[in-house]
Image: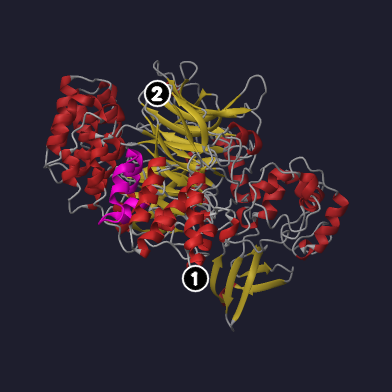
Amino acid sequence: MNKFIYFLSFSILHLIGCGPTADSCQQFTDPTQVETTRDSLAQQLNWPDGIQMDYFSGPDLTPCPACLAVAPDGAVFAGVDMMGSLGKDPDKGRIVKLIDCNHDGVADDHILFAKVDNPRGILPIGDQVFVLHTTFSDETGQASGMDLVVFEDTDKDGVADGPSTPLIQNISSPKFLQDRGTDHSTNGIRMGIDGWIYIAVGDFGFHDAIDRDGTKMTMLGGGVVRVRPNGREMEIYTHGLRNIYDVAIDPFMNIFTRGNTNDGGGWDVRFVHHIQSGEYGYPVLFKHFTDEILPALIDVGGGSGTGALFMDEPNWPSSYSKVPLMADWGRNELFIHRVSEDRASFQQQNDPFLKVPQITDVDVDGSGQLFLSAWNGAGYRGNPDIGFILRAVPKDWTYSPFPDLQEASLKELGQHLQSTSAVARLHAQQELLTRSSDNSRKIALAIAQNKDLPLEARVAGIFTYAQIATKGGIEQLVHLCKDEQVQEFALRALTDRLGWAGAVPTEPFIQALTSTSDRVRIAAMVGLGRIGNKQVAKELLKTKVPASVIAPARGTIGLHSIPNSEIIPAHIAVRSLIRLHAVEACVDAIGGEHSDLALWALRYMHDEQAVGGLIAAYQKTESKALKKQILTTLSRLYHKEAPYDGSWWWSTRPDTHGPYYKTSTWDSSPKIELFLRRAWKQATRSEKAFFADLNGKHRMGIAAFGGMEDIPALQNKEIHLGRIANKKGQIERSSIEDIMLAIEDLEGDPAVGKELFGKQGCVACHSLSQGEPLKGPFMGQIGAIMNRDQIAESILKPSASISQGFASVQITAKDNKSYVGFISEESANYLILRNIAGHVFRINTSDILSRKELETSMMPVGLTNPLTFQEFASLVDFLAAQK
């Protein structure tokens, strides 16, 4: 934890006064104090000159803000979560509504909107506030799942009118919420201009989530799920992500996420562009089966992606607008990913934007006020004294009140739907939907048809019209498909709702498959899969598989984070063939012009007809190359993924070999094995090597073929402390979360910890008594400042919690002298610097050539790697005893 921010946050408690409702707003703050606070923060975090940052609220109102959302009028809904990501006790969460009455960037008023545990996503729309949060059992006091719910505030008093209404229940695994907390659970929510609520699902996945239709759905692993605001029509949008926390959605329904690090397991933070129905491969395909996935746009290394927003507001300079903003808790920064179109996807440039300690979320209101929430070192189990929210605006920004849309006329709502502000377009649309009438439908259609309007306005018109007209709008949307400018979006809108997609004609989609635009072609492919007519499979099979679709050589890792737009059409065509379960068409295509795509799709069709067709095609062909392709496909079909029941999870460092994680045989497995054995017996010695490769790659486990690798047994992810307490090097082999969980109930021996304090080199940097020379941060009273969890986290992540006064400074001075250390004293003429060994240097300021504050701690990472959990607990308990 940054001590400067902590004490600054603490002092701010006395600056903010709070009334019961927004109606009683008045200015409670001293402008001079607020300005001093803002300037101190700016200096500490080196914010850009052109941005004004204000300390909106501190830990008195918003400790541990895990998420936030902003109404278009600037009201901030903060999700306070003092349980943290690893905590397991209920009644520590709430949603606080904050109002800035005079628009100076400091909250003047607050009110408790609702009590919820582990708020992880908030979305205010009109009088409704959608919330994603953990639920707890009244009987057991343990987590029972995660729900997407909606609160209403129709009397506009700032407090939810009553209990929430569940929209989706059980959208995260209860077992792992109980075992671990919410660290890999389901997280942020955001609405697109298509009217769907998009949900970022972490890699806990879920089993038997149920929506308001009564539809049950299971998802093994992470991805994006979407649902209508009434809690109906739940469906999976994309799959194969690790631990995403939020989604950013642009005006053209491009969705972006920034994932979480794999704790050293080879899966770093990936920035991903989501294409509907796409498979991104984590954890079983993204390394060794990269020919079957959509790659990320970039792998940025370690970090922890959290909140996300696509910024599209006219009150911001162009350099900060029309870009995805991605918060990264691990890097303490809000990043800009500058995306540029590349066929159906993008290339990107990743730039730092705003420094914020352990940033959790970001959102913007209708006047361009950007709000950012910061965990600020509150630890994995929360801290009631830490956390804050900032407001950011351009220096030349002036407040412009957002109109009361409920009082607006239909004509005015139509004008707002054409706004250059994404916030205005979305909320105008949602208000129009509450007035479903012939006039509102006509207004939306007129905007959709107007070729003189900007594209984002026309897209907003198309999706608004589709939501109002539903099935009755098919004819007009088909007509809009003839307009090249909006063809992609008309195609998407036509099949956006599965309830009436079956009534949509296939002709516009088949025609669009020949478009010169990959975006149009992909919209057509996705749509044909959703219409559900298998007769179109032959058209989808015409999609060419580009030469860049190459399986990585055995034992190598493929390119899973290098963008490759040319593979997207083939990938999406395969996903639609799978959705159609077009077995017959794919079998018929084997050996023909479209054989490659057909065989690709057949890898996922565990169907007796598919197996029979593959065997028949093998026996019919004389082509050795085709025979190998068929054998590969049959080998892949030998196993399938075992049904997921929510009882297990692949942990922070899963087996990434693939192609399945937990395999099972199925009805045709014996038939496949018999055929493969016969083919193997007929093969020459050199040809048998091919079978060995298949056996290893697909993990069939047929001993006669050879090539098998040791397959790690699926581990029970519960930590058995008795077995590993004396296992050397356990800290190095474990993720931080697993270490924190392991030592939770493990009592250390402070005497052993004192010995380790010397053996592990801690004494080189830290003193324990006042008489010793000052080196790094003084440890003689650390137990009075930090709790056990905070001490453990500081050891494991030293750069995430640099104490005030101990930031590393690099100085270059005259006579080729250089120094690295912390500054213990400074005047206009000189400064005193102490290095990590406690050596003291007096440096004249006139001799300093350059001075740079480093972002990393002088304490190296990994000092405790050789320790067991028991030893680490002893070291932590020794330090915790230093009062």
Q: List x then y, in percent, for residue 225.
A: 42, 36
What's the colour scheme?
secondary structure
Residue 824 pos. (x, y %): 68, 63
Region in magenta? 574-599
Residue, x 70% and y 67% (percent of image)? 836
Per the rendering, the mark at residue 686 is 1
Q: Which amino acid lies under the numbered mark 2 shown in the image of this protein?
A: Gln
Q: Quadrant of residue 536?
A: top left
Q: Secondary structure at mark 1?
A: helix
Task: Tell me how far mark 1 sits from mark 2, CA to CA.
Answer: 67 Å
Q: Is residue 71 above or below residue 456?
A: above
Query: Label 1: how many residues lie within 10 Å, few (<14), some (14-19) or many (20+)?
Result: few
Q: Which residue is the extreme one toward the bottom? A: 815
Instruction: Give the percent coordinates (x, y) of residue 673.
Output: 51, 50
Q: Position of residue 511 (x, y in %)?
A: 15, 45
Residue closest to the eye, 826 or 747: 747
